[in-house]
Image (spheres, rainbow, N blue to C red):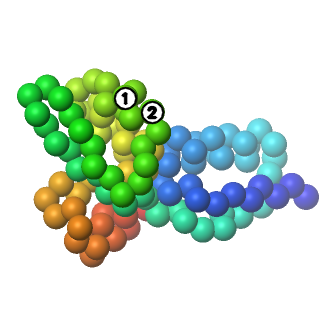
Amino acid sequence: MKILATSDIHGNKALIYLIHDIVKKENVDALIIAGDIAPKGFYQFFKEGLKFDISSGFRLRNRADILKGDEQQIKTKLDLLGFVEIPADAYNLSAISLKQKEKL
C-alpha cells in the first residue's frame, strides 16, 4: 500500500496540482493531508502609477517575479499560490475567514 502524507498546502493550487500528479503517477492508495489547508491570510494591492505592491501576513517568495505583469496577471499568480484578496478591510478576521472558505 502506498501512502502519501503532506501538510501546509495553504490553498496553493500549484502544489495541489503537483500532489494530484504524484498520486496518479505513483498509484497512491491513500492521501493524508495533516492540516493547514486553508488559503493564506490576505493580500492587498497598492497601486502607485504603474507600480504595484502587495501587503500580506505571509512572506512572499520571489516577490519581484510575482509583481511582474499587469494587475490581472499578478492577481492570477497570487491566486495560484493560495493568497486571498481582501482589499477593503484587510484586518477583519471574519472577512478573511469567509474568503478562505470561498477558496476552499
Give the secondary structure at mark 2. Answer: loop
Left or right: where does residue 77 sit relative to residue 93? right
Left or right: where does residue 48 sit relative to residue 104? left
Residue at (43% x, 58% y) in the render: 39
* Residue 95 x, y percent position in the rendering: 24, 70
Residue position for label 1: 64
Q: Is residue 31 visible?
A: no
Which residue reaches farthest left? 49
The amino acid type found where label 1 is placed reads Ala
Is 78 drawn above or below residue 90 in the view shown? above
* Residue 94 x, y percent position in the rendering: 27, 75
Left or right: where does residue 25 sit relative to residue 8? right
Is 50 drawn above or below residue 15 in the view shown? above
Which of the pair 57/86 is nearer the observer? 57
Residue at (43% x, 49% y) in the render: 59
The quadrant of the rendering that contains the C terminus is bottom left
What's the distance in space between the residues labelled 2 and 1, CA to CA? 5 Å
The amino acid type found where label 2 is placed reads Asn
Residue at (37% x, 29% y) in the render: 64
Give the secondary structure at mark 1. Answer: helix
Quadrant of the rendered image containing residue 35: bottom right
Which of the pair 58/102 is nearer the observer? 58
Residue position for label 2: 62
Alpha-carbon neighbours of circle 2 within 10 Å: few (<14), some, or many (≥20)? Answer: few
* Residue 22 x, y percent position in the rendering: 72, 42
The quadrant of the rendering that contains the N terminus is bottom right
Left or right: where does residue 12 sit relative to residue 64? right
Quadrant of the rendered image containing residue 40: bottom left
Check if mark 2's residue and mark 1's residue have beta carbons within 8 Å.
Answer: yes
Which residue reaches farthest bottom? 94
